[in-house]
Image (cartoon, helix red, strand yellow):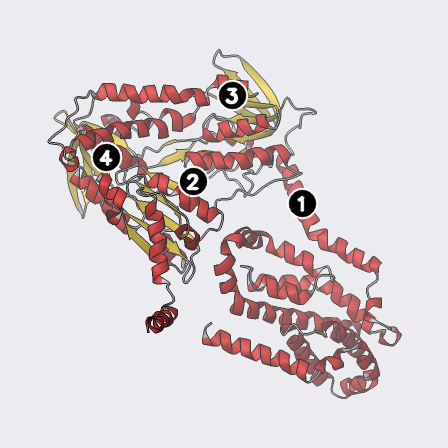
Amino acid sequence: MTRPRLTLLVALLAAIAAFVALDLGRYFSLDYLKSQQAVIESWRAAQPLTAALIFFLAYVAVTALSLPGATVMTLAAGAIFGLGWGTLIVSFASSAGATLAFLAARFLLRDWVQDRFGERLRAINRGVEQDGGFYLFTLRLVPAFPFFMINLLMGLTPMRTATFYWVSQLGMLAGTLVYVNAGTQLAGLESLSGIVSPGLLFSFALLGIFPLIAKKLVETIKARKVHARWTRPARFDRNIIVIGGGSAGLVTAYIAAAVKAKVTLIEQHKLGGDCLNTGCVPSKALIRSAKFLSHTRRATEFGCRGASANFSFGEVMERVQRVIRQVEPHDSAERYRGLGVDVVEGSARIVSPWEVEVTRQDGSTRTLSTRSIVIAAGARPFVPPIPGIEDVGYLTSDTVWTLRELPRRLVVLGGGPIGCELAQAFARFGAKVSQVEMLPRLMLREDVEVSALVAARFRAEGIDVLLNHKARQFVVENGEKALIAEHEGRDVRIPFDAVLVAVGRVANLKGYGLEEIGVSTGRTVDTNDFLQTNYPNIYAAGDVAGPYQFTHTAAHQAWYAAVNALFDPFRKFKADYSVIPWATFVEPEVARVGLNELEAKEQGIAFEVSRYDIDDLDRAIADGEAHGFVKVLTVPGKDRILGVTIVGDHAGDLIAEYVLAMKHGIGLNKILGTIHIYPTLAEANKHVAGVWKKAHAPQALLEWVGRFHAWRRG
């Protein structure tokens, strides 16, 4: 504990101890107040301003120190100053004292509480940040809740001090009026319990839920307003209609059917979405073939004199399609129809908040009514408006799978995950790859040493990694295609036979009625914590909603969208993004969950780093993959995990242990105490926990233990 905190704590404890030791509590009883009423009133009449100031300061001190007596002092205010002035003095004094108690709790304990229980408090913190004023107002209106506890507990949350003060000022006013008014009739009071009758307490309880009712009323009014120009059907054909058959759409439909809801899933292209047809599945199939080729070139590393592989790039791409066809039944219309989903192969258009027009592939149309709609329309590759790009033609992660001949010279535009994965794969097949990135490093979201390690591997494999190169223009000169890029103020000419654009993806927001009915959008469909759009019965999930564009997060969001769409207003859940993992399947593989050093520094979050280099791991050495590292960020002095980055073979698999640990509050001590099979790559996770343990070994205690063993040796 820091010196200022220790000083404040000692001062508070001393004040409370003095209150108890001097038995000052006797001055805060109803009997004492009644016996001294005449004396106090005469003192107030003689020195009204001084009396008001002293009373104000005393009230602030009592509430700030959370001492018993605030109730009696409120009565005294009514008896001494009357209803008007008494209410005014107590209202401001109680709010000021409460705010001081709030600040003291925050200064002394909040950091400790958040460090120790931050993961468990994440949902509470988020709720307080968004709706803390409503919750506090509710508690302030009900005298049954001890106000001093509210002051202290709110100090441990992220609530703004100004919000706490003005909500307290307003929320405590009703109770203050009741007690001050009772004080004006002090002579007739026999006990404090007589002030607030059960009926009055019930009335306060009703007042307490008023903010929540008001919030729900505001939501209802907003919903009615946005729905005002539409006619709600008397009955509905469906419980839910899902637009889009990618990961988010499939999971939404699956959940709806599983709980016996009537659901229609509409997809205009291919079920499975980008992941199955143009993303995760084909890219990993391609990467696997490329990795096999890279191993043949490393034959001498494994004790072989040589190895080679004859291959046709066209046959490799046909294998990619075979893999897609093999996985395809998992996402097929037949399977989902068997599960109870009405699968429609066609296009959808939202024509009202409760109606979707469906156009089948044969041209027939039908309008279905539904209680809820889930938009899962996905995203598409972004093609920047660079002059000449249309003239030279370009590939994207959607269209590259049509290739059957390997480009001799390939420019990959973009240094993010998609660009990096495909650049390395094509280079391993023998293409001369130039990777062009306008930023100073690849994979900018990862830590600097991760980017450096990947870039070094790329260059070692013959990829021309061109950082700080901004694409300015595509040209065709003498029949040769070239990219003109700006680097350090000068133009660089990069010739190519094909260009692959991989600079990001944009949400699909047009063509199915969002603009026409007024669904709010930005870069994605705008949603709240429950994945609702500005129309409360229309939800969005997956790439079209963000903030993450991963297949697994789309499926994760789909659960919330489905359950909320089907069971609101009876029950709904806020989408939880607290533990989101991802991986980039380059070699060395990169996987991450939670914070890395870059993000922790940007957010001002204190952390410690424990790192284990995989070049020391027995299994990695035996496999010829002794490179990379495991890096764990923890709370300073604690084993609680803030984030993990793994670089190395099978990093995407190894990260799962940390995803589980972070989700369920498991620290490095328990990972260290868990048996890991020898020899496996997973041992790296245990070894990094050992690094943390060694750094936090109790050196003073170990020194005494050493003396103990020396004594036992005689």
Q: Answer with mark 4 or mark 3, whichever residue precedes in sequence.
A: 3
Q: Compared with residue 598, is residue 110 higher up or lower down, i.e. above or below? A: below
Q: Answer with mark 1 or mark 2, whichever residue precedes in sequence.
A: 1
Q: Determine the residue positioned at 36% across, 68% down.
A: 702
Label 1 amino acid?
Lys
**C-alpha separation, residue under disc 1 versus residue under disc 2:** 29 Å
Of tags 1 and 2, which is closer to the observer? 2
Mark 2 lies on a secondary structure that is loop
- Relative to 80, is 442 on the left or the right? left
Measuring from the top left, give residue 587's x and y in whole percent: 26, 38
Q: Answer with mark 1 or mark 4, whichever residue precedes in sequence.
A: 1
Give the labeled residue for mark 3: 336
Quadrant of the image containing the C terminus: bottom left
Label 4 amino acid?
Gln
User: Would you call the spot at circle 3 few (<14 residues within 10 Å), some (14-19), or many (20 or more)?
Assistant: some
The residue lying toward the viewer, choosing from 223 and 577, is 577
Say which mark, if any, is on residue 548. Answer: 2
Label 2 amino acid?
Tyr
